[in-house]
Image: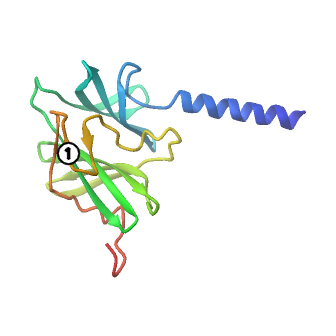
């Protein structure tokens, strides 16, 4: 009986943890990307307006404490950029980033059967990597980039705040290249 109650308690706590996922997105927003990396939460949230996602916002910081935000919408002319690149024959990495001054904040998620790292954030200053945060396992799947109007397979965006670029950041620090492979 004690073992049964313990199993029920663990299942209940696990279910509540998923339901109360740590994210900086509000309940009225769509979660584009969200994960926990150490003590920080990395989120990209989208506010739907008339069926389109008008405001896309990057939010970074500890639980309940934002340290940085960056928003893109038609009004402010800020942009997010997207690309997709293979990291080996069985895995593709989708990237969504923005530039702010000399800094580039790049979120990525890997999909496919041979992903050594699922998702994370890389910060570059003048094209040199200065920070790398790897996301912890997220059973909700919100560590995969999912944005309406953005088709990573076709490299097409119908979202006015996201532009595809044929610019591929160096991800070999996250996904090491083996001799004779990608």
177 or 112, nearer to the observer: 112
The kind of secondary structure element at disc 1 is strand
Q: At 10% across and 23% down in the image, what residue appears?
A: 75
Q: Position of residue 47 (x, y in %)?
A: 29, 23
Q: Which residue lies furthest to the bottom in this view?
A: 180
169 is higher (above) or lower (below) than 63 = below
Q: Which residue lies furthest to the front in this view?
A: 154
Residue 36, by quadrant, is top left
- Please, which colouring scheme is shown? rainbow
Q: What residue sits right under mark 1 in the picture? A: 156
Label 1 neighbourhood size at 10 Å, few (<14), some (14-19), many (20+)? some
- Picture residue at 41% right of the left edge, 25% below the top: 64
Q: Quadrant of residue 61?
A: top left
Percent coordinates x, y for residue 114 in the rendering:
45, 63
Residue 164 screen position, x and y as percent:
17, 47
Look at the picture and state if 133 lies above or below 89.
above
At horizontal 31% and vertical 63% (from top left) the residue drawn is: 86
Q: In which quarter of the image is the C terminus?
A: bottom left
The x and y percentages for residue 158 are 18, 36
The image shows a total of numbered marks equal to 1
Vertical comparison of 49 with 18: above or below: above
**Residue lying furthest right:** 1
The residue lying toward the viewer, choosing from 62 and 85, is 85
Q: Is residue 118 left or right of residue 52?
A: right
Residue at 36 percent of width and 61 percent of height: 174
Q: Quadrant of the N terminus?
A: top right
**Relative vertical location of residue 86 with respect to residue 81 in this rendering, above or below:** below
Q: Within the image, what quadrant is residue 78 found in?
A: top left
């Amino acid at each position: 009986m004690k073992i049964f109650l313990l199993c029920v308690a663990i299942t209940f706590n696990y279910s509540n943890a998923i339901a109360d996922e740590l994210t900086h997105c509000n309940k009225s927003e769509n979660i584009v990307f969200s994960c926990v990396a150490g003590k920080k939460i990395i989120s990209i949230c989208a506010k739907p307006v008339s069926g389109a996602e008008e405001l896309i916002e990057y939010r970074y910081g500890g639980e309940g404490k934002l340290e940085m935000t960056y928003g893109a919408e038609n009004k402010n002319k800020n942009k997010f950029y997207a690309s997709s690149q293979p990291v080996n024959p069985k895995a593709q990495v989708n990237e969504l980033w923005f530039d702010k001054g000399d800094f580039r904040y790049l979120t990525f998620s890997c999909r496919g059967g041979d992903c050594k790292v699922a998702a994370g954030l890389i910060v570059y200053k003048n094209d040199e990597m200065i920070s790398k945060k790897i996301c912890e396992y997220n059973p909700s799947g919100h560590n995969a980039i999912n944005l309406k109007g953005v088709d990573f397979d076709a490299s097409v965006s119908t979202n006015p705040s996201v532009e595809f670029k044929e610019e591929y950041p160096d991800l070999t620090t996250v996904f090491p290249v083996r001799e004779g492979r990608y």
